[in-house]
Amino acid sequence: MSRRTDDVATLIAEAREGRTRAVARLITLVEDASPRLREVMAALAPYGGHAHVIGLTGAPGVGKSTTTSALVAEFRGRGLTVAVLAIDPSSPFSGGALLGDRIRMTEHASDRGVYIRSMASRGHLGGLSWSTPQALRVVDAAGFDVVLIETVGVGQSEVEIARAADTTVVLLAPGMGDGIQAAKAGILEIGDLYVVNKSDRDGAHKVRKDLFGMLKLADRAPEAWDPPVLATSSLNQQGLAEVADALVEHREWLAATGNLRVRRERRARDEIEAIAVQELRSRWASVGEAGAMKELSARVAAGELDPYSAADALLA
Amino acid sequence: MSRRTDDVATLIAEAREGRTRAVARLITLVEDASPRLREVMAALAPYGGHAHVIGLTGAPGVGKSTTTSALVAEFRGRGLTVAVLAIDPSSPFSGGALLGDRIRMTEHASDRGVYIRSMASRGHLGGLSWSTPQALRVVDAAGFDVVLIETVGVGQSEVEIARAADTTVVLLAPGMGDGIQAAKAGILEIGDLYVVNKSDRDGAHKVRKDLFGMLKLADRAPEAWDPPVLATSSLNQQGLAEVADALVEHREWLAATGNLRVRRERRARDEIEAIAVQELRSRWASVGEAGAMKELSARVAAGELDPYSAADALLA
């Protein structure tokens, strides 16, 4: 029985029929870096490319989970199926606190057109976990129309989400203080769509106005996409229709201009590169105590060798 | 003349005599990824290992630059020379804003025992720039007693700074709201020393108490370092002597237990790995339009190939 449900071809067939358990099992194979991951990825390859992959990022406290949940409801209302990959910070300490947010998602728990998965953010790449692009392949191949990737948008994860997604939504909110000001800089370069949430609060108008001003200063090519700045009150399910419309419009723009293919080839390149680098890292590490890396590190630390010569030796 | 001052051996000799211009020129060679970088690193290798490398991280607004500046004053009062590497977010948009903070450092501008450098945070690794470990080699070889690496502590850069430094200081402050709460989780795993700045403000005591409680819950080996939690008011130059004492104590602990060598070998391994990966990435990218990576990415994006098989092909 367990043998049968773990058969990769069967799991994929079931996932494509909309069976959530099979989707979950495949993502677990991804997260556990199962030896059968290669087999899974090879079998999934022909089925990819259907989903609109939407990255949603923003500082802690802007209402990412609420907005994700509201957006899920909006897309469901349009008859689309939605998968959510929510990336948590990697720390075991944070598990509890952030899981609390996930509970808001339970309104969708009984809806078979919705699949929600919290992904651990593991490994040296931080923000977006190593396994996210592969989990994305699973839900894409399973036939979901929309995949929402939600990350805590601080630093590097913003850039990673923008590279992984077709469309990147940057969420802001009034009254976030210094943090959001500092974060804005990086944010200006990655958003295809800006959403000021908690728009019923004081200062929401100013955040929107400031953002407009900053985006205007950005040096865009005339043929480039001009990112809209929208307002929501996700807790009250307000403004989500406009957000969904803008998302659809961006996706159509991507397809019409050839940018969809460009983005997806870039995503593929990032994936290939990450897998190749991971493979090399494990080769370098696996030589053990007597291994080249161990000896090279000791020699570099002792000042007997410089890191470039050590890297040459490693690659030779 | 310009030819002479760019001679690597001369630059290194001058840097080791305390000439700031030579130090600056060498770091510029690092930042520009000069073709002579290998030569520089090979020539610097024998001179490393003297400096106490201290990473200072914390959320925006906790007073990192003020604390760095106050700590520089404290170390200078003890007769030690100090280099500061300040890592800015990579965005061109943020240059102006963050440079403002740097101005506080000008009190040290005329002190030859202090060298301050703002580093751009470039490249895919985010937070800590690719060039930071190599800039660290320059100031270490130049003979500075203390090197302070200051980063905006959000997400991944915290982990990177903890791996690059001998001692990691995590700075907090009262009244930072949601952001700091979410950030705390990752913070608990990386600090060798916690400093609650703005200790004259309401809530400072609570931050300290909460932190004590959270650190107590952490599962530490009996022989592990027990991170102290100190309080400062850096703007008023208060509490810095205790911080400096704790830093010295941690450094002595590292040396006495053999952990200094362990950390430095790990840092060397990270450096070698990063250089090797960078070298491979540029090889993969340099094949041009007709290159393997370009074709592999297109085939993966089109669903003709899975990313693992593509990575195999790339490495073959």
Image (cartoon, coloured by chain):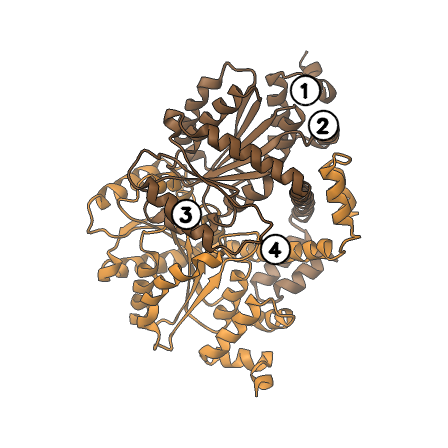
Chain colours: A brown, B orange
Label 4 secondary element: helix
Q: Is residue A295 left or right of residue B158?
A: right
State the CA–CA distance, disc 1 to disc 2. Answer: 9 Å
Residue that carries the numbered disc 1 in the rendered image: A16
C-beta proximity under 8 Å, tags 3 and 1:
no
Residue that carries the numbered disc 4 in the rendered image: B274
The answer to whether tags 1 and 4 share a subunit is no
Closest to the camera, between mark 3 and mark 1, is 3
Circle number at residue A211: 3
> How many other residues sit within 10 Å of disc 3, few (<14), some (14-19) or many (≥20)?
some
**Hey, what amino acid is under mark 2?**
Tyr
Q: Position of residue B104 (x, y in %)?
A: 31, 66
Closest to the camera, between mark 2 and mark 3, is 3
Residue that carries the numbered disc 2 in the rendered image: A47
Closest to the camera, between mark 3 and mark 4, is 3
**Hey, what amino acid is under mark 4?**
Ala
> How many other residues sit within 10 Å of disc 1, few (<14), some (14-19) or many (≥20)?
many
